[in-house]
Amino acid sequence: MKFCSAAICLAALACIPPQPAARQDAGTFVRIIGTNDFHGGLEPRADSAGIRYGGGAYVAAAIRAAAAECAPRCEVLLLDGGDMFQGTPASNSAYGKPVVELFNELGYAAAALGNHEFDWGIDTLRARMRDARFSIMGANVRYADGRDVEWIPNDTIVVRGRARIGIIGLSTPQTPTTTRPQNVAHLRFVEPAPVVDAHARSLRARGATHVIVVGHVGGFCGSTCGGEVFDLARALTEPVDAIISGHSHSLLNTTVKGVPIVQARSSGRAIEVLDVPLSGPGARAEVRPVLTAQIQPDPAAAAIVASWTARVAGEFSQPVAVLSERLTRTGQQHALGNLIADAQRAAAGADVAVMNSGGIRADLAAGQITYGQIFEVQPFDNTLVRVTMRGADLRRYLQQIVARGRPNAHVSGASIVYSRDSAGAGRIDTLLVAGRPVDDAASYTVSMNDFMAAGGDGLGPPPAAIVEPLRILDRSALRDYLSRLPQPVNVPRTTRIRQAGQAP
Ligand SMILES: [Zn+2]
């Protein structure tokens, strides 16, 4: 852990210079400080209440404060749960380099290989792995024939005082449908639990005193906890000391079979601080919000952020439109999703548009919005395709959206009423296109993005369809559509995919 550079020591009162000799013997626990799903979040953002959070300089300050407050009683280990790069103009325009530079400065030891790390292809990912002074690991990634992927590290051992900490990295088995499918078509993302068991044994045989899993596998907790990370924890047979989770952008701070599981939301909104004793049980975990009003930005990190954001400021600060209200991604059907689907239908000149809800990555504030804000809503460089299909195929295609009883897409040009059976599966009762029932024999055009057209989110087109690439960037379609509408833009609030009995 790099605690501080000389420059930061001069500037930050909280900074404690490293004292290697004293620290060797004084440490009584390992403090793991973790982030996940940073998604290029170099600059702070505001939530719906206007509270500003995150940003590289503030996350850095929170990390350094957490490290300094336990020195010299602790050994510090900085880890990330994956999806570091994808999501903002400054990060994307340099393919994640700014985030690697920031994480190098902070002294990260290891990160999980997130699904979005594959978004720009294998060559770019490998270049970022070479830039990183920390391991980006995915122990459960294989070639199609089952061989281990030689360029993806599986585990590592880092020494912190008396502790030899074994770290195992994991990627989500959902990766093939949550990055560009063609980028990972030659890879398999296998069930993680047996992989962790095997590596935990191997790490202990190599002298590890602790085993930590840094996994881009997520989950949610309500009255009970569920999801990939919980399935993993329940299936493990080897002891591990903690699981640093990612991918679901959720707040997790719980235990399964005594193993702490933590996740700190996303985009630098929070960090997790997990204290693991050097010997014996009794780990303690905390998820701390990173609120810009409560912390002074870290100067070294601020300089890195400023140098990268300045490069894209001109292009992305252009005003595009004025919104009459804030658009959030709350609920299964929302106005922001409708608006994007409308924009993509207009750009493609199609009868219908379908937009996968998982591809809508940020809210939009009320008032004047810039191209940079639109970029964060649709950061993936997806382009639009126009798909021509028969009415009968269109009905079957749209049926996939409601099949699980929770629509995972937004539509334009169509109205869907569905009902759910006792098992929760959904089935379309009524389908209207342009206000009329669908004619099974007629031909319809459907606009979608190339991620979906390649099978992303399980929403690939039917086999008999004709797929026509349009070379229109999805966010350009949204920008152009918004700028053409009367200002301020009134948003389409109707519920276009609704359960029988629900108001339109
Ligand atoms: Zn992810």
Image (cartoon, rainbow, N blue to C red):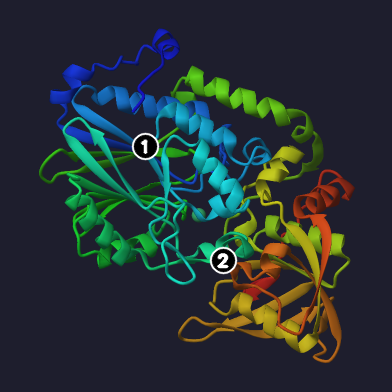
Foreground residue, 34 or 135? 135
Q: Amino acid at mark 1?
A: Ala
- Residue 109 numbered tag: 1
Q: Is mark 2 within 8 Å of ligand 1?
A: no
Residue 400 visible in the snapshot: yes
Residue pointed to by mark 2: 177
In the displayed structure, 131 sits above or below 251; it is above
* Residue at x 56%, y 24% (from the top left corner): 304
In this rendering, would 88 be left or right of 420? right
- Residue 296 percent across, percent down from the top left: 46, 19
- Residue 353 percent across, percent down from the top left: 77, 68
Could you tell me which secondary element the residue under label 1 belongs to? loop
Foreground residue, 470 or 14? 470
Question: Which of the 4 quarters of the picture holds residue 238?
Answer: bottom left
Closer to the chain start, of discs 2 and 1, is: 1
Q: Amino acid at mark 2?
A: Thr
Mark 2–mark 1 Cα distance, whole angstroms, equals 28 Å
Number of callouts: 2
In the displayed structure, 138 sits above or below 7; it is below
Q: How many residues crowd mark 2 within 10 Å: few (<14), some (14–19), many (20+)?
A: some
Residue 50 visible in the snapshot: no
In the displayed structure, 38 sits above or below 101; it is below
In the displayed structure, 11 sits above or below 167; it is above
Question: Which of the 4 quarters of the picture holds residue 26?
Answer: top left
